[in-house]
Image: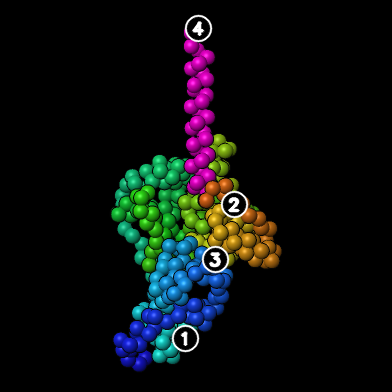
Amino acid sequence: MKTIDNKTIEQARNADIIGFFRKHCGFSFDTLRNAYRCKEHPSLAVNGDRHSWFWHSRGIGGYGPIDWLMKIDNIPFRHAVGIVSGIKLITLPKIHETMPPPTLLLPDKRGISVRLYDYLCCKRGIDGWVVSTLIHEEKLYEDKRGNVVFIGFDENQEPRFASVRGTNMGNGFRCDCAGSDKRYGFNMTAYMPSERLYLFEAPIDAMSHASIENAVTGDITAWKRDNRLSLAGTTDKAIPFFLNQHREVRELVFSLDNDQAGCEAAVLLARKYADKGYSTRIESPIGKDFNDDLAAFLAKQKQEKRTNHLHRDADILPF
């Protein structure tokens, strides 16, 4: 590789991101007011300056193609500059072929999951049995900073994907761990082989859907009758691996967020997998996502219990 000077770096840093996406990623865009929305990944948006971008489903953003290559493709800085500037002879696909798979860097575990239970069960309303089972399956743990870590495994039961979620309701911190491979999504598999797979944007959505199932049926194991998979966004990178590992699955239920990005992605993915021979349908939440639906369901249950108590108290009042 030739020497990269400051001028080359600055030019690469300020390169047109739309042109980069079209050339190196094959993405196309719709113009929406003073911004651009990716057709292939509806939650990926570019500002009107054609430099600043943000991938909403992943919570990752940046400025220019160098940031994209480093944050999304795990490309080192010098390689990223070379790719954008055209100095480096190795093309982007070749880099992916020759570079070893990234090593997943997992946060250290905390011994007692106090903040995890408080956040998921008390603040988010998720069924404690669901949480305990996932911890036992090592798909969920609390790190030493008090964050919740969601794990996805490969065919050898080795962790290959991890996302971190802050337990402070105020800041909404979330990110994927370095070295994560989105082909191996966080999932909740059925006890017995099931033909149905529910698909969500995030682990908490999947857990909330499972909690609603338990509450409606009154059975703490009802959620284990079907499979659930988090896509870590609105792309389908995690679907092929899961289907390959669970050949019995024939029905895909797309339960993505009830917003523009989620609804558009659900329609596209449902059509895509229907063309592959699967039975597909869309089951959108009533609120923005299934955690909103769970909160509404629990609030309704609480109100009904309060009303029933009042009626019983009224019945025993002396006249």
Q: Of label 2 and label 4, which has the lower sequence position?
A: 2
Above or below, 272 relative to 284: below
Q: Nearer the viewer, residue 247 or 170?
A: 170
Q: CA distance from mark 1 to mark 2?
A: 40 Å
The residue at the far bottom in this view is 2
Q: Secondary structure at mark 2?
A: loop
Give x and y (percent) for residue 103: 38, 70
**Residue 298: assigned label:** none
Position in image of residue 86 (x %, y %): 43, 89
Who is closer to the viewer here, 162 or 2?
2
Q: Residues within 10 Å of mark 2 (few under 14, many from 20)?
A: many
Residue designated by label 3 = 42
The tag earlier along the polypeptide, 3 or 2, is 3
- Which numbered tag is attached to residue 91? 1
The region drawn magenta spans 289-318
Q: Is residue 244 left or right of residue 105?
A: right
Instruction: Report the Cα–Cα distance between label 2 and label 4.
Output: 50 Å
Which label lies toward us, 3 or 1? 3
Residue at the spot of label 2: 284
Give the side of residue 30 with respect to residue 52, left or right. right
- Label 4 crowd bin: few (<14), some (14–19), many (20+), radius 10 Å: few
In the image, 304: left or right of 272? left
Find disc 4 in the rendering and name its residue: 319
Q: Position of residue 240 (x, y in %)?
A: 57, 66
Q: Is 32 colored magenta in this rendering?
A: no
Select label 4 or label 1 by which is in front.
4
